[in-house]
Amino acid sequence: MSMKIRLARGGSKKRPFYSIVATDSRNPRDGRFLEKLGTYNPLLAKDSEERVKMNMERVQYWLSQGAQPTDRIARMLEAAGAMPKKARLNPKSAVPGKRMAELAAKKAARAAAPAEAAAE
């Protein structure tokens, strides 16, 4: 049985609230789970203590039993210091699209034109 530590969505429309749960990976997202490990409220400020609450003792237990955290939960655990930071590489995320590259080139050309006129 492959175990996951993941988010289960609750809350009403446009007001999300998540439970952090340990579950079998074959169960649906909001379906049956084995244990509730904490909560996550994305509507609160990022520096709020109430945004992410986890029972770290139980999270460590499930990790020791072989449960795999999802990417979002892994990031929360890294922020809490429970897991070492993993290097993530997405080189295309920093590259601007075609339209933005054209706009940046035009802007650079306009900025260079008055500098050349002032130099003469």
Image (cartoon, rainbow, N blue to C red):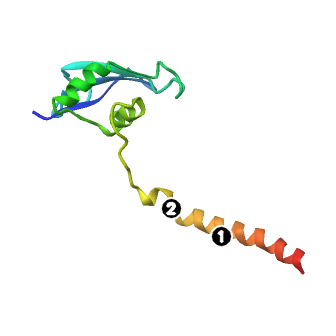
Compare residues 58 and 33 and report the one nearer the observer: 58
Judging by the rendered image, the residue that carries numbered circle 2 is: 95
The amino acid type, in three-letter code, at marker 2 is: Val
Quarter holding the N terminus?
top left
Res 37 → quadrant = top left
Compare residues 13 and 84 and report the one nearer the observer: 84
Mark 1, other Cα within 10 Å: few <14 / some 14–19 / many ≥20? few
Secondary structure category for the residue under label 2:
loop
Give the residue at x 33% y 35%.
83
Quarter holding the C terminus?
bottom right
- Above or below, 100 relative to 50: below
Compare residues 48 and 96 and report the one nearer the observer: 48
Q: Earlier in the sequence, mark 1 or mark 2?
A: 2
Secondary structure category for the residue under label 1:
helix
The amino acid type, in three-letter code, at marker 1 is: Ala
Judging by the rendered image, the residue that carries numbered circle 1 is: 105
Distance, label 1 to label 2, CA atoms, is 14 Å
- Answer left or right for 74 relative to 116: left
Point out residue 51 in the picture as x, y percentages from the top left corner.
Answer: 46, 22
Give the residue at x 25% y 26%.
60
Give the residue at x 47% y 18%.
50
Res 111 → quadrant = bottom right
